[in-house]
Image (spheres, rainbow, N blue to C red):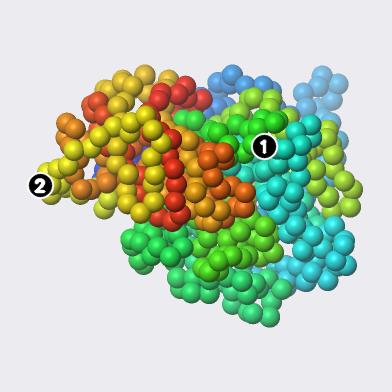
Amino acid sequence: MSTSVGFLSTISPSACPLHERHSGAAPSGRLIWPRVSCHGNGDARQPPPSSLLMDRRDVLIALGGLTGGAAAAGKMALAAPVMPPDLGKCHYAHSSVCENLKCCPPYTSATPLRVRRAAHLVINDHEYMEKYREAVKKMKELPDNHPWNFYQQARIHCAYCNDAYDQVDFPTVPVQVHYSWLFLPWHRYYLHFYERILGKLIDDDTFTLPFWNFDSDDGMTMPEIFTADTSSPLYNANRDTSHYTPAILDYKYSYGNTAGSGETGKALVLANLCYMKKTFKQSLPLAELFMGDPLRAGEKADSTNGFGQLESIHNAIHMWVGTPECPHIDMGDFSTAGKDSIFFSLHANVDRLWHIYRMFCGNKVEFTDTDWLDSTFIFYDENEKKKEKNVGIQVRDCLKPDKLRYTYEEVPIPWMNVNCRKTTETEEKTKTELSLVRVEPFGSDPRELSKTALRVMVPRPKKSRSKTEKEEKVEVLLIKGISVDTEGPARFDVYISKPYGDLAGPDYGDFAGTFVRLPHKGMKGKERKGSLKLGITSLLEDLEAEDAEKLVVTLLPRMGEFTIGGVGIELLQTDNPRLL
Ligand code: C2O
């Protein structure tokens, strides 16, 4: 087992660009980004990768073009606060009184670092699997009203996701941990306590939840630890069993709409990897594109703001696991999702992807806004104490997994190196020119989106932006005033293409992102409007559309009915200028 304690600490922010390779695509699964440290805490034992495996820019960066590279060599000061030393690494002190002075106190780490492992890799570790089953069994056997009881734990998710609490001082505003920047931190804490409770039940303080490595070739099926044995405490009968192995997960899944990615087998795996890569690449310049918009006290989630693209992918996976028939229990509905053990593995990987995102960004705090950092949650911990404000349960205290004493096993990240430059979504020009149609602007009134695609011509604030301009501001496509005209599940996908004057071909162009919502009672109608923000700077480069004054934006309804308030393009200040 590879227990990589320094998981990803060896990835440099300079490695973020997710550049396409134009020749000699790396073999899938091979990590070829410069393995240098983000903040000088990298593993010095790692040799630099062969320069043959990197493109020129990566080589320059690895040689120290950016701070990450320089820091790894330990040669240059960093513009960052001083961090505490690694207590496990003590060498002789310098003293004129005696030589070979060892003055570090004996180091014992109070809490062991728990290493979460990939679900498809733990299946043959019988000792671990025995423990996991035993822990969940014990959790299920606890008295119904015990806060650690399996179903009580599942209810926590329901309570925070289905409007069971109101915000303090705002009696009409429910507490909601989806659809905003609270999504990732809240679920991180939820898993953290859940994991510790399971460990406590089997008296093992190293116990971890496995992560569903759905962003890797081998992890793109439903993990068999949850499906193979119907008598296992990890089994749940409320699923779409047609999606059991060998069915391949489709990030573009929606109920009753088999189109999905339009691919099967290996091509579907590749489509998912490219989707993941695109999600990272487009959202690296601005955290909210990945993690969700701000949500402050008194604001209703899903009222004016939107969720990040990681949450969208996660929503589609919820649907893919849950029963295809209404009411889509258990995983397809937030009120029941926690009753399926697979939930915690899905979320462990979502959490891992957040961790990767953060590493790509040099461990930068995603939002320095105290309305995020001070947001506070309450959970029961494994000692049955109620954790409250100021006892380590604010967003600011969960930003680094090792602070919560867990990490992730190092596994390959195949989407980093996958070559996706031209996808099948983009047809050749000659084909599309044969049947050009006029595309009108959105107009000033809201428009319906139900059965057919809505195509609009959207002006860009600026064309032919320079590299410096792109580093300063990210181009963002905004779909505003989205109301879902149903309480059921809903999804539409967004495509962008380059017009020919005011004309567009039948091809929708390249996939830019998606809006996916699970069923949600009370979320129907005009007063609950959301928005969708998609970073398109890198997409326009891929489309070779940087010189276009306008873009054709296509909203493709997949499930449910919508009213759309408007579509626009804005330039937003990036918070990661170096990452384009
Ligand atoms: Cu709270 Cu996967 O959802």
Residue corresponding to mark 2? 434
At a point 85% along the width and 43% down the height, the residue shown is 387
Quadrant location of the C terminus?
A: top left
- Specify whether 471 is left or right of 40: left
Residue 120 location in percent, x, y? 56, 66
Residue 313 location in percent, x, y? 50, 51
Residue corresponding to mark 1? 399
Question: How many numbered dots are placed on residues in this image?
Answer: 2
Residue 470 occupies which quadrant of the picture?
top left
The amino acid marked with disc number 1 is Leu
As helix, strand or loop, the secondary structure at mark 1 comes to loop
Closest to the camera, between mark 2 and mark 1, is 2
Number of residues whose C-alpha sits closer than 10 Å to that of mark 1, classed few (under 14), some (14–19) or many (20 or more): many
Residue 74 location in percent, x, y? 57, 27
Quadrant location of the N terminus?
A: bottom right
The vertical placement of 153 against 242, above or below, is above
**Disc 2 and disc 1: Cα gap in Å?**
52 Å
The amino acid marked with disc number 2 is Leu
Residue 486 location in percent, x, y? 52, 52
At a point 55% along the width and 27% down the height, the residue shown is 71
At a point 36% along the width and 58% down the height, the residue shown is 261
Residue 207 occupies which quadrant of the picture?
bottom right
Question: Ligand 1 near label 1 (Cβ, under 8 Å)?
Answer: no
Q: Nearer the viewer, residue 277 or 566?
A: 566
As helix, strand or loop, the secondary structure at mark 2 comes to helix
At a point 17% along the width and 31% down the height, the residue shown is 501
The vertical placement of 235 against 22, above or below, is below
Which label was assigned to residue 341? none
On the question of residue 438 being in view, the answer is: yes
Q: Nearer the viewer, residue 136 or 52?
A: 136
Is tag 2's residue or tag 1's residue first in the polypeptide sequence? Answer: 1
